[in-house]
Amino acid sequence: MLQLSQRNFFTKFTQADLADFFMTKKYDIVIIGAGHNGLIAATYLAKAGKKVLVLEANNEAGGATTSVKVFPDFDARLSRYSYLVSLLPDKIVNDLNLNFKVLSRRVASYTPYHFQGKNNGLHISRIWDDQTANSFSQLPGGENEWKAWQKFYGDIEQFAQRIAPTMLQQLPTRNELKKNIALDPVWNDLIENPIGVTISKHFKNDIVRGVVLTDGLIGTFTSAFTLQANICFLYHLIGNGNGEWKVPQGGMGALVKELERVATAAGVTITLNSRVTQIASDAKEVVVTLEDGSSFVSSYLLSNAAPQTLAKLRGKNPPSSLDGSQMKINMLLKQLPRLKSGADPRDAFAGTFHINESFTQLETAYEQAKSGKMPDNLPLEIYCHTLTDPTILSADLQSKGYHTLTLFGLHTPATLFDKNNDATREEALKAAIQSLNQYLEDPIESVLAKSNDGELTIEAKTPQDIEEAIGLPRGNIFHRDLAFPFRENDEAPGWGVETDDARIFICGAGAKRGGGVSGIPGHNAAMAVLERD
């Protein structure tokens, strides 16, 4: 029998409701995991009249999309894991009446570099302007590069506008999607030819090539010359038809709170501290068992957990996948550091700050990590949430000029940390700080805040740490390898959420067209169930 004291309920029950709950434990749909995709699926299904239960193993909803007071002595709630939003379709926001706002960053990126003994930086505004053109012009062959940039991303925007609406529909076939997009040269560049070949064809400057390539390597341990990089690149550029990465106002936790609100308002039951240990199914129903021995019966099951986790719960062999490949570092600063290039840090850190990410550096780092060595020049991406949205800080911290920095290290696969996670974490953190400091007038240590015990306010998370905290296999932020957003011509029709069991669906990042903070697999899994029911 379930012990009420072990559960935290979002829905308020009467005594009669509780009696009915404990006696029947029967639902139309049970969803494993109260991450954003699980909550979105639950809300769509509840609005369609279904009785829905969401089981969350942790003591709070959200999964990777939470805001956390990382440094207890400071009133600053950081988006500890996921931190930017691009792929969440406006249609989902409107369908569910979400009161959630994302903010545009005025700067797309800043990439510091050394050239002819001088410190400089490539500044790219979100909307092309004179500052961007002038910054390109300081690169060798810069004028040709910025013309190529505008042409390349103009073509991609057309591609994105045509592919984005299909993300909330049944999977098109490869041929159908290619025909509907009707941009064959762009299709070949993004789908058929390795993105490394495409980038090398369009751009000549090593720094520019690297900035373009980074979108193909986020959380993906691969070379520029594999199609896996193409898939990652595509997902980072098609969100809502424009690929803009925006800042969630109030942090990722604001999205989770809003999703909890609309889910419970629609009648969804969400239980916390409810870890699933077994799933069994037959032609009629699915039985879900928790670690305390209690069980629930439903007509359908949706899993927001990784496919590897789902397979283990079903007693099946888990699918293979690439390791996670990112080092996540969160920082709280007393003030922004000055740059050796002289650029205003309020510009440089407002977008994505690229370090050691020329094309050559990225490929070299991959080869070194592949051989089992921590890259000599660790590729890093940094952004400052508080320059766009200071509301994650208390009024006191805002008035004192505090800021947050989020650092994302590339080509740091889980295999590098297997032998000694703690020691290698320290090695990687040291390498990251050294890489950052080579471009700073003020070493980052000098501007970090200090906790009451004198410790600097910086935390590092390896792929293993991420797996332990939120259950992402080997720290893979996409759960498993991303797939192109279509099915091959000989594959059966579907939504990309189906499994080998007609009553079990994937509603998380491990679905086709999953990955990122998108809600797309949550929507698509709900539609697949409603279509069958």
Image (spheres, helix red, strand yellow):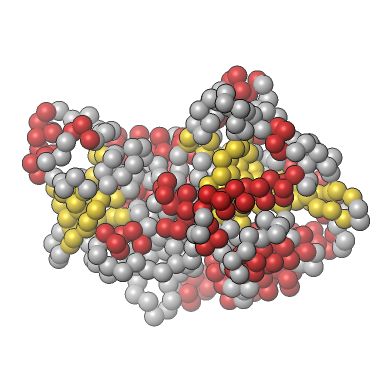
Q: Which residue is drawn at 80% across and 68% down?
A: 204
* Residue closest to the eye, 129 or 57: 57
What is the x, y in percent for residue 447? 70, 32
Which quarter of the picture shows residue 499? bottom left
- Seen in the picture, residue 293 relative to 485 is either above or below; the reply is above
Question: Where is residue 102 shown, x and y percent of the image?
Answer: 54, 39
* Most foreground residue, 363 or 97: 363
Is 189 situated left or right of 524 in this image?
right
Up/down of 125 relative to 374, above or below:
above
In the image, residue 316 lies at what x, y percent? 27, 67
Residue 485, compared with residue 114, is above or below; it is: below
Q: Can residue 347 be seen in this view?
A: no
Quarter of the rendering containing residue 139: bottom right
For image coordinates 22% across by 48% down, the residue present is 291
Q: Which quadrant holds the C terminus?
A: bottom left
Residue at image coords 67%, 51%: 431
Q: Which of 99 and 397 is in front in this view?
A: 397
Task: Give the number of callouts.
Answer: 0
Question: Which quarter of the rendering shows the N terminus?
Answer: top left
412 lies above or below 14: below
Single out the residue that lies furthest toward the right. 116
Q: Position of residue 498 (x, y in %)?
A: 32, 65
